[in-house]
Amino acid sequence: MSDLCERLQDMKEAGVYRLTCPLEVLRGNVLLSEQRSFEIDLSKVHSKAEFLVAVAHAIQAPDWFGRNFDALADALCDLSWLGESDKGYVLLLLNCDETLGMTVADHAIVADIFNDVVSCWKTAGKPFWIFLA
C-alpha cells in the first residue's frame, strides 16, 4: 500500500486540498483505498447554478436536490442514495480556478460548506477528501 493510499484512509487528515501529485496517482490510490469518488470538470462552470448542476450530476443527486447551497450541504453530508461507503469519499474538482467558476461571495459559501462536509463525515467516522486540480 502506498503512502498516499494510507493517508487517504486517515480520517484526521481528510480535508480540502490543492492536488499536488499527478492526477493518475491520486486516481490509482483512491481505487486502492476503496473509497467512493466523484469527479467534476469545472472548465465550463461560470456561475453558482452551473456549479450546483455539475455537483448534482456527479453525485447522482436525488430529485429532492434543490440546486441551492442548503441542498448542496445536505446532499454531500448524506449520500445515502448511493449506498453506504465503508471507506470514505473523494471529491475531485478538475480544471478549477480560484473561485471554482463562481463569484467570490459564492465561493466563500462553498468553501464553508466543504469544510462542514469534511467535519460531518469525520463525525460519522469516515474520511471525506476534496481535491482541487
Image: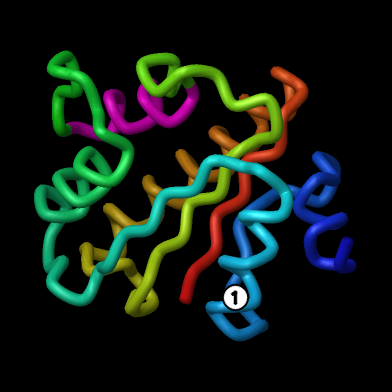
Name the secondary structure under disc 1: loop
**Is 70 within the magenta?**
yes
Figure disc tally: 1
Quarter location, residue 82: top left
Position of 63 with respect to 127 (left or right) is left
Spot occupied by residue 77 in the image (x, y as percentages of width and height): 49, 24
Q: Nearer the viewer, residue 11 or 4?
A: 4
Q: In which quadrant is the N terminus drawn?
A: bottom right
Q: Which residues are magenta?
A: 68-77
Q: Amino acid at mark 1?
A: Leu
Q: Residue at x 38, y 58 (%)?
A: 39
Residue 63 screen position, x and y as percent: 13, 17
Residue with the mark numbered 1: 19
Q: Compared with residue 28, is residue 37 higher up or lower down, i.e. above or below?
A: above
Closest to the observer, 95 or 39:
39
User: Percent x, y for residue 108?
Assistant: 40, 54
